[in-house]
Image (cartoon, helix red, strand yellow):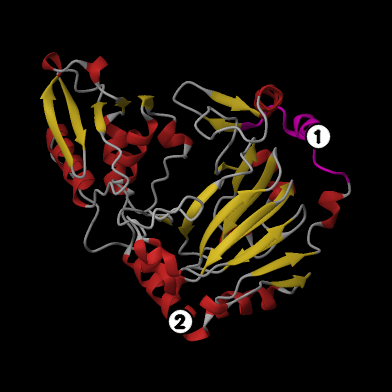
Amino acid sequence: MVNTAYPAQAFDTPHALLQGFIGLLSEEFENPHQHYGTAICIVPELDDIVLEATITDTLDMQVKDRAAVDLNQADARLTMPLATVDRIFRDFATVDWRDPEIIGTVEMAGDMALVERLARSAERPTDWTLDRFADAEELHRDQGYRELSSIDTIYRPSQATVLDYIDAGRPAIIQGLGQEIFEQPWTLERLEALYGDAVVRVRSATEHVTMRQFCAELRAFMAANDKSFDRGLDIPYTEGAALPPEMHAQFGPLFFDKTELTIPQLWFGAVPTHEPTSSVHRDPHAGFLFQVIGRKRLELYSADQASMLYPRKAYNLYQPCWHTPNAPDFDRFPRARDLRKVTAVIEPGDLILQPAGWFHEVYALDSPNMSVSYFWAY
């Protein structure tokens, strides 16, 4: 589970670590949407210097004397401990910026799109992930999945049947599982009563939000905004944060032993219904999405259409794409004109299986919305 092109590195001095960090960010930097600006990265342990980044079609990042830089003139500012920079090299294939151990150590201000561009440029896939995607592309091509017009619905399948679907690389909607969980509908009030003190979102090093606080923010936000609100707002949405341990018994995996699955992720909060809640991407593991509140629509694209979606070079746990099907730019991404998709709608109690390699984009049909996702580890 390594990447021979980007092995984990060790550095003798803090300054060597920063130079390695600059090289890592620059090697696979892409900016096809041409979102330009400047960003400053501050490492608190090194109070005499900063990293200054000029972001155009390329990344120009340099170590500067802090006294010579006007920190207030940058479009974005990032404060990151040296230990977090070091961890990026050790865990490049698994580092997740939503992880409280990461986001909980970082302070951010200004243009978040520029911060995201820098952060994502530090990610790298393992050789295993690269091979997994190549295998999925070959399988989908051989099975003709680009022509798939509908997704199977299966009722309370055995674990063996689920494994057959995973082996065939064929997605399915699974129904009839966890019926006792839905004997009562899930509401904000029920979530507060059962999990009020559970931490559902870590926004920064100093801000940890409980379920009770989050639901209060959600109610206030929904009262102040209609369903067409813009994602540019600071919306109450967990966006794939780790599912709190207190919620695992109710919403944990419905198939396989828990040791065979990744930590469940929580997708809960206010979401626009006119644009995707998760932009198009693919995962190297078979994934499950369990719907709890509201409905979701998934647009799926077979792996053999990868070149038409313009997947990003820098990624690790999942591979996002530059092409945005909901707002296409065919001048920049002309191959996307020939894409074919298949659509699935899931309701509370439904579990959708997406075998490794399927590109997918997720839309919420109702807001607020809640889903739990996890991945098979093999």
| On-image quarter of the N terminus | bottom left
Residue 217 location, quadrant: top right
Q: Is residue 8 left or right of residue 254?
A: left
User: Where's residue 351, x and y in %?
Assistant: 70, 60
| Magenta stretch, residue numbers | 184-199
> For residue 58, what is the image quadrant?
top left
Q: Nearer the viewer, residue 160 or 115?
A: 115
Which label belongs to residue 190?
A: 1
Q: Position of residue 114 (x, y in %)?
A: 32, 35
Whether 96 is drawn above or below 139: the answer is above
Badge 2: residue crowd in 10 Å (few <14, some 14–19, many ≥20)? some
Q: Earlier in the sequence, mark 1 or mark 2?
A: 2
Q: Nearer the viewer, residue 185 or 57?
A: 57
Q: Which residue in the structure is indicated by mark 2?
A: 141
Let me know if residue 144 is in the magenta part.
no
Q: Nearer the viewer, mark 1 or mark 2?
A: 2
CB of mark 1 within 8 Å of CB of mark 2?
no
